[in-house]
Image (cartoon, rainbow, N blue to C red):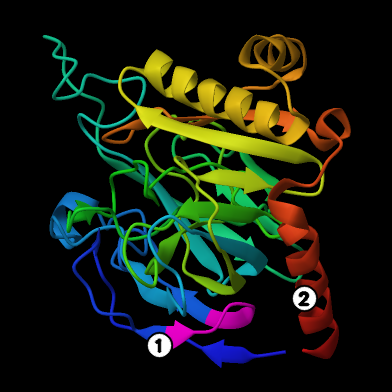
């Protein structure tokens, strides 16, 4: 088993960056990521508008180049382990940002929501984080469900896309499905693919409604692999129970349509069904969790049970990477 450690300076965009690490397919990579505020928001008095500088938000670690990856291929990123690096995490509301406030594109005469910070206590040994209300004595322990909000590859055509923006390359999709045990698939746009990730969340509800999750620095382990000659027009995910397609766009219904369209096509390809038969099957068995409804583009997922599909995707890459992850964790 090949294991490498990645150390890199933070980046704030996908594209136009030399690889920080080049690895052969099947390599386990250990890395660290900073939270979306770069560690600058540490307490309830650290308002992001005062302690952070735009556009230096949402740093990502990488990129990782995969040997042999060329446009037309697909890379797989399997999440082995994701765990918070600190005993605290933060969440915020921003003026003109979030699903339930006026924004720069949803103009309203009333005032925007105030800027406010919540600090969560994080206990990795107990596997919980504690929410403290700001205006009452209420508090509650919530189970950790660590995930990465931002994962992707370099875009096509020499484009550079800020790390806060999701798209067909991946990026800031903010789906809670991107947790340990999940394999993410990305179509390769440039030689090496150039995988970057960041934006760790201790946990997040679907939609990331207020605009931020429980934002945390993470220690993360992934396995990266290469699937030659396989196309992947939008990022796809797989865990032990589901196949998932993503769609990113505005308005939200277009993100929904993209994800459903991709899953219908993917399922039809796997089962040898014509488009309408696959459309009917997904219509009766599919689920549609939200990724985010707050970012520069919105992200929706379409998911179907693997018990419905019944055949392995990408020739069983997920199961193979799960086995690698199990060996790594046993030997660590």
The residue nearer to you, when weighing 71 against 246, is 71
Residue 276 in the magenta stretch? The answer is no
Rate crowding at label 1 as few (under 14), some (14 to 19) or many (20 or more) other CA atoms within 10 Å: some
Highlighted magenta segment, given as a residue range: 22-30
Residue 123 seen by the camera: no
With 159 as the anchor, is 176 left or right in this view? right
Give residue 301's position: percent from left, percent from top. 56, 30
Give residue 171's position: percent from left, percent from top. 37, 50
Q: Secondary structure at mark 1?
A: loop
With 299 as the anchor, is 12 left or right in this view? left
Q: Residue at x 50, y 50 (%)?
A: 214
Give residue 95's position: percent from left, percent from top. 21, 32
The residue nearer to you, when weighing 12 against 319, is 319
Q: Is residue 38 above or below residue 44?
A: below
Q: Which residue is mark 2?
A: 324
Q: Residue at x 32, y 80 (%)?
A: 19
The residue nearer to you, when weighing 293 against 77, is 77
Q: Which residue is mark 1?
A: 7
Where on the picture, by quarter, is residue 198? bottom left
Q: Which circle, 1 or 2, is nearer the viewer?
A: 2
């Amino acid at each position: 088993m090949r294991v490498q450690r990645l150390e890199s300076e933070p980046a704030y965009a996908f594209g136009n960056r030399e690889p920080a690490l080049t690895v052969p397919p099947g390599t386990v990579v250990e890395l660290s990521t900073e939270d979306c505020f770069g560690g600058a928001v540490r307490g309830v008095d650290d308002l992001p508008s005062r302690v952070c500088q735009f556009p230096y938000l949402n740093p990502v670690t990488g990129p990782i180049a995969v040997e042999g990856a060329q446009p037309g291929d697909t890379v797989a990123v399997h999440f082995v382990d994701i765990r918070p690096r600190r005993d605290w995490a933060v969440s915020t509301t921003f003026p003109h940002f979030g699903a339930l406030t006026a924004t720069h594109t949803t103009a309203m005469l009333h005032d925007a929501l105030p800027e406010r910070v919540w600090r969560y206590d994080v206990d990795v040994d107990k596997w919980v984080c504690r929410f403290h209300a700001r205006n009452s004595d209420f508090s509650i322990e919530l189970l950790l469900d660590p995930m990465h909000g931002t994962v992707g590859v370099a875009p096509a055509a020499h484009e550079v896309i800020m790390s806060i923006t999701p798209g067909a390359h991946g990026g800031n999709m903010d789906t809670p499905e991107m947790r340990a045990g999940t394999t993410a698939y990305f179509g390769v746009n440039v030689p090496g693919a150039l995988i970057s990730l960041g934006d760790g969340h201790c946990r997040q509800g679907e939609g990331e409604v207020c605009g931020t999750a429980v934002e945390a620095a993470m220690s993360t382990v992934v396995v990266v692999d290469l699937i030659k000659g396989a196309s992947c027009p939008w990022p796809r995910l797989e865990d032990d129970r589901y196949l998932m397609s993503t769609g990113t766009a505005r308005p939200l219904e277009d993100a929904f349509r993209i994800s459903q369209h991709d899953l219908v096509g993917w399922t039809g390809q796997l089962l040898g069904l014509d488009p309408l038969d696959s459309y009917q099957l997904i219509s009766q068995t599919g689920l549609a969790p939200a990724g985010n409804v707050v970012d520069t583009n919105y992200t929706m997922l379409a998911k179907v049970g693997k018990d419905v599909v019944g055949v392995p995707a990408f020739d069983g890459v997920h199961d193979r990477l799960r086995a690698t992850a199990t060996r790594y964790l046993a030997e660590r």
